[in-house]
Image: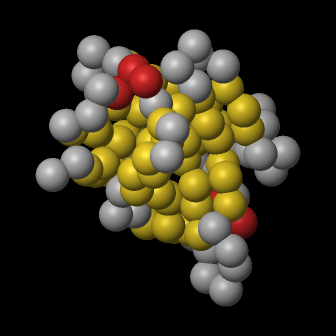
Amino acid sequence: QVQLVESGGGLVQPGGSLRLSCAASRIVFDRYTVAWYRQAPGKQRELVASIDRAGNTNYSDSVKGRFTISRDNAEKSVYLQMNSLNPEDTAVYYCNAHWSVIDIWGQGTQVTVSS
């Protein structure tokens, strides 16, 4: 079964940091653009950051300068380093991999930023 598995979510204080990980299996990982999305309560899912097969990155305006996406093709993993977290970052974060007509989604990991 093709799958993406996220980890690293949790509860963090405002101003703190978390590093999310997403491990892929049973895909040729380096072909895919991989991304992190998030969905907060009552809101639509939004793209947070993406990185393509060449290493080009894109970020939403709300996280630029605070979050960094990276990938390790040998490990078939994608990471999201999140710094200077604020309560507006609270959401379920999802890993996504896209290539051609294929979209693969992880199960999500909860990030809660609260004092």
**Towards the viewer: 69 or 35:** 35
Of all residues shown, which one is farthest toward the front?
A: 101
Q: Position of residue 93 (x, y in %)?
A: 50, 59
Single out the residue that lies furthest toward the left. Answer: 1
Q: Which residue extends farthest right? A: 61
- Side of 24 where 104 appears, left or right: right
In the image: residue 75, left or right of residue 65? left
Q: Residue at 54% of width from left, 47% of height from top?
A: 36
* Residue 92 x %, y %: 50, 67
**Depth check: 17 or 97 in front?**
97
User: Between residues 101 and 21, which one lies in front from this camera angle?
Assistant: 101
For residue 66, which quarter of the picture? top right
Whole-percent x, y for residue 105 in the image: 40, 56
Q: Position of residue 69 (x, y in %)?
A: 56, 31
Specify whether residue 110 is in view.
yes
Q: Is 17 rendered above or below residue 31?
A: below
Q: Residue visible at 40% across and 62% down?
A: 108
The relative height of residue 67 versus residue 2 in the rendered view (above or below) is above
Q: Is residue 47 left or right of residue 103?
A: right
In the rendered view, would you say 88 is above or below 7?
Answer: below
